[in-house]
Image (spheres, rainbow, N blue to C red):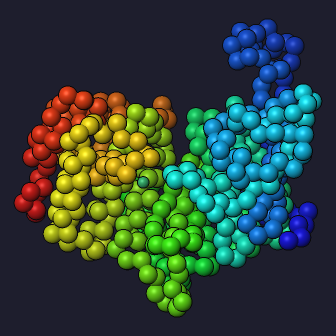
Amino acid sequence: MAVSAGFIQASGWRSGHHKALPHHCPSPARMAILLLALALAGGCATAPPEPEITVMPAGPGEVEVLFELDRQVEALEFEHPADEIRRRQWQLLDKELLLQHDAIRSGQRQRFDSVRIRIESDRHPVHREYPPLIEFADGGMALHTRYLKQAGSEQTLFRVEAGDWHAALPGGENDEGRVLRAHDPERPRGSWLYLGPQAPSETDFGLLVSDPALPEALRKLVREGLEQAHAFFSERMGAREAPLLALAHHESAEAPALHGDFSAGPALRLAFAGPLEPNASESPQWDQKALLRFIAHETGHRWNADLVTPNVAGGGSWMVEGSSELFAIRFLESRGKFSGEAVKEEYEQALAHCSGVIETRPLAAISPLEPDYGAHYSCGMLFSLMTEAAFEPGDIFDFWQYLNHFFHEADDYDQSHYLGLLAEYGGARMADRIASIVTDQDADRKALLREGLAEVTCFDEGC
Ligand SMILES: [Zn+2]
């Protein structure tokens, strides 16, 4: 594809006019005051260079990314460790540079101030990793910015050069052709940058880009599902201000599957994998209920993984996954898609699954790479019910509103914050039970789970 030098200017949600913050060293007069701070921070001379990143389409399923640094360096270090992914999907176009230990380095001890990389779309995604680049049927692409984020930098400027294509970045603001992105150092997870021929559509929750490969009926359901789930959760847990960038795309695979991710910014990706039926414009082959549940689960992550970022080290993903599971069930119930009987069945299945897994080891011992990882979802949903039963001020939505309120300043929460909050508001015993099921090698975890669920109204009998 021919690449024009013109900037695209599209899809800004905010009209703010932001200028790039130049990297600068303090004046001599300020030097004395800042001496201590500089000594602690390593000084101005070692602060990371502020890169400007230009993204250009380079052919089907490929982009070229140009890093322009504000000075010569020996290495450009990245924040997110992903050597394997970068080696597989990135091609350095400067032959004397090499990818090594999550950095681009000069092979001959020379310094450099620009780097040109070609990135290919991920046709063999790594399990549970963000694909570096996804491809839409109309040639559009979405680039995961996490892999590009330089270690220690606070702000990255993305500029898209793609003729009359459109571009969008969550939380980004357009300024004379630049898509600006203030990377928050506290939330280094990165996000999605969309570029393509399709103008993102404006919705109640922000912007939506849907892959034209997806059946029309499915695209409609995605949009409506996202809007309804947003309205439902906003009413219960408070509206979210930052507009969302949602990407719905098709992924080729032998069997139908749904997977999504939520990242800071915020951005939401919904991937519909599997073969498309010949008359795809009419009939999505995926089950409607499963689709809505998936959409609601991912949307629910806005309230447990956006304003306050979960620190899930040590097995805490039950907090986010479990609550999103329960949020989705409550949403489906509200839409009349789940009867009381169906909900009860969901709980029973979760109980059977969770008990089977925690019988032999605590939940925290199960890593994302294991088939039993689903227990973070099933046990997590049961823990959400137990939390709701014990939390005196209200239901599970109120609990998350409290959690967001109390830990917003810290910008981070982990299991101890979650359980501490529960203990403080009437659930001390319940918090202990959950903690033991998650981490205690010696506890009778199944008995503790049964004990906790005995306090959940309607668990056994239905309502
Ligand atoms: Zn999830």
Q: Quadrant of residue 97?
A: top right
Q: Quadrant of residue 208?
A: bottom right
Count of marks, rendered view: 0
The residue that appears at 23% across and 39% down in the rendered structure is 360
- Ligand 1 visible in quadrant: bottom left
86 displayed left or right of 221: right
The residue that appears at 58% across and 65% down in the rendered structure is 247
The residue lying toward the viewer, choosing from 187 and 294, is: 294
The residue lying toward the viewer, choosing from 226 and 319, is: 319
The residue lying toward the viewer, choosing from 293 and 304, is: 293
The residue that appears at 41% across and 42% down in the rendered structure is 367
**Quarter of the image that includes the C terminus:** bottom left
Observer able to see residue 280? yes
Against 278, residue 262 (above or below) is above
Observer able to see residue 406? no
* Residue 374 x/y as whole percent: 34, 52
**Quarter of the image that includes the N terminus:** bottom right
The residue that appears at 61% across and 74% down in the rendered structure is 211
316 displayed left or right of 140: left
Against 337, residue 82 (above or below) is above
Against 262, residue 383 (above or below) is above
* Residue 198 x/y as whole percent: 70, 74
The residue lying toward the viewer, choosing from 278 and 344, is: 278
* Residue 215 x/y as whole percent: 53, 83
Q: Quadrant of residue 9?
A: bottom right
* Residue 341 x/y as whole percent: 15, 69
92 displayed left or right of 209: right
